[in-house]
Image (cartoon, rainbow, N blue to C red):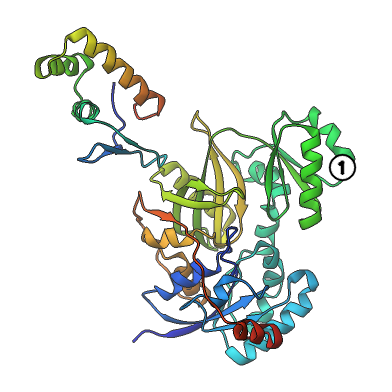
């Protein structure tokens, strides 16, 4: 999954899509996922990173991660 | 030292259905290349722009174009002799035809305008839009003009409900049934006359572009915006500038093909499958023009310079993510101001 290149993300987790004018707020976890997506990490790399750095098992995170990316897709924030 | 120009501006009705006059004046007062003296031209004596501070230096009441263009031009001639405006910026769709027809005459009296040609004005009418799309190769929703209530029943053969019912100058309603079409037909025709335009309803997001063409096919300015907060009259109460390159492409293409002269507003629906349909072409500066100035393109200033015959370089950039939020504010006036304008037609 790739985030659209022109999506702006602020320090506070505020996303702005300059094409549509839509804006969104994400929490710390969402912000980190977006940061990793912007670094063009693969889904597996992101899931691995969270499993290693947070107290969460891989399967639970994976479920939440795909829910989150589905929301990103729904809002046309991905390519 | 900057030159000072006297500029006459209409559309001072800064209400919840605002005319572009006040934002145009604010933009002109922020012009970097000249100073201004503003002569406000008002149709009604309670238009807020008349009473707002630092908007008009002098105000004249003028007769509605519906009373006859001779009456209006006689009044403009009188104002012209007294105030000697360098440029006149009309801001209402309904008055544009009169001013366009009188462009030569106005120029002879020393008042310059920078308006579309009659041909440009006529071919982008709501009722003519499908033909415009065909001629210049733009996606336009199917539409047809209706002049009689008896035509409404036949619409089901050409349109799917819901459909849009629009006035030739203003107003648009979404109708789900023939009964609603009849209701809106009566409502709009009582105010703006016929034809009423029936337009295919395209689902998507409405986006607008404020632009300026130099009459030779060049786009001098173009700023796209999405309404973020819409009033029950469908007017933008808040909006944000967009960085959608496709909207700029459509605008440049349209201005180049039509050799558009003057300010304009494109109303476009962007569908979920990323198709862009032009739903209206307004032949004047829009009421949200101050957002374009805030984003870095002072379109009214550029328009005045073009009207004065100067060469104006196209703007190359603007800020994406600039927002505007309208607000209402109570002005305190005095009956003596109202009295003066009502009795003498001037303030």
Give the percent coordinates (x, y) of residue B183. 79, 42
Q: Is residue B343 left or right of residue A22?
A: right
Residue B66: where, in percent of width, then height? 78, 69
The residue singled out by tag 1 in the image is: B149
Query: Callout 1: few (<14), some (14-19), or many (20+) C-alpha neighbours within 10 Å?
Result: few
Q: Residue furthest bottom?
A: B82
Residue at 43% x, 75% y is B29
Looking at the image, can residue A77 be seen? yes
Q: Residue at x 36, y 61 (%)?
A: B296
Where is residue B222, by image quadrant? bottom left
Work out which residue is located at the far right of the displayed protein and give it. Answer: B150
Q: Kindly identify which chain the residue marked by label 1 belongs to.
A: B
Residue B89 image position (x, y, % from top left):
57, 72
The quarter holding residue B83 reads: bottom right
Number of numbered callouts drawn = 1
Quarter of the picture containing the C terminus of chain B is bottom right
- Point out residue B335 in the picture as x, y percentages from the top left corner: 62, 82
Q: Nearer the viewer, residue B231 or B339?
A: B339
Q: Could you tell me if residue B110 is visible in this image? A: no
Residue B137 located left or right of residue B219: right
A66 to A2, vertically: above or below = above
Report the front residue among B53 and B40: B53
Tell me the element at label 1.
Answer: helix
- The answer to whether B75 is drawn above or below residue A36 in the figure is below
Q: Identify the residue at image location x=28%, y=16%.
A: A64
Horizontal side of residue B187 vs B41, given as left or right? right
Q: Is residue B271 above or below residue B301?
A: above
Q: Quick one: quadrant of the N terminus of chain B?
A: bottom left
Location of residue B267 with respect to B160 vertically, above or below = below
């Amino acid at each position: 999954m790739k985030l659209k290149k022109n999506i702006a993300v602020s320090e506070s987790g505020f996303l702005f899509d300059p094409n549509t004018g839509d804006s969104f707020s994400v929490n710390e976890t969402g912000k980190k996922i977006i940061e990793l997506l912007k670094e063009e990490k693969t889904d597996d790399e992101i899931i691995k990173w969270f499993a290693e750095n947070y107290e969460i098992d891989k399967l639970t995170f994976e479920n939440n991660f795909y829910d989150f990316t589905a929301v990103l897709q729904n809002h046309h924030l991905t390519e | 030292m900057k030159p000072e120009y006297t500029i006459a501006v209409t559309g001072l009705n800064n209400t919840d259905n605002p005319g572009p006059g006040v934002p145009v004046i604010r933009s002109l007062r922020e012009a970097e290349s000249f100073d201004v003296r503003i002569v406000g031209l008002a149709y009604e004596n309670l238009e807020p722009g008349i009473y707002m501070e630092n908007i008009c230096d002098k105000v004249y009441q003028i007769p509605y174009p519906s009373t006859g263009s001779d009456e209006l031009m006689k009044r403009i001639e009188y104002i012209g002799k007294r105030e000697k405006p360098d440029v006149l910026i009309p801001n209402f769709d309904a008055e544009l035809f009169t001013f366009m027809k009188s462009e030569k005459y106005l120029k002879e009296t020393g008042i310059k305008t920078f308006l579309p040609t009659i041909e440009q004005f006529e071919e982008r009418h709501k009722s003519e839009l499908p033909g415009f799309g065909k001629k210049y190769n733009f996606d336009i929703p199917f539409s047809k003009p209706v002049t009689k209530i008896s035509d409404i029943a036949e619409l089901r053969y050409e349109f799917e409900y819901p459909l849009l019912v629009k006035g030739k100058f203003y107003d648009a309603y979404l109708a789900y049934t023939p009964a609603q079409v009849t209701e809106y037909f009566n409502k709009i025709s009582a105010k703006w006359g016929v034809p009423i335009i029936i337009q295919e309803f395209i689902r998507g997001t409405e986006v607008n572009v404020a632009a300026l063409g130099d009459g030779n096919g060049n786009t001098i300015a173009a700023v796209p915006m999405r309404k973020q907060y819409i009033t029950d009259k469908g007017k933008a109460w808040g909006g944000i500038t967009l960085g959608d390159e496709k909207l700029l492409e459509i605008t440049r293409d349209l201005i180049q093909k039509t050799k558009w002269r003057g300010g304009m507003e494109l109303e476009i629906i962007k569908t979920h499958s990323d198709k862009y349909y032009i739903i209206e072409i307004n032949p004047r500066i829009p009421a949200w023009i101050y957002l374009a100035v805030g984003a870095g393109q002072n379109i009214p200033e550029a328009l005045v310079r073009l009207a004065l015959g100067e060469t104006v370089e196209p703007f190359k950039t603007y800020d994406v993510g600039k927002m505007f939020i309208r607000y209402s504010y109570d002005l305190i006036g005095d009956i003596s101001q109202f009295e003066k304008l009502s009795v003498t037609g001037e303030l």
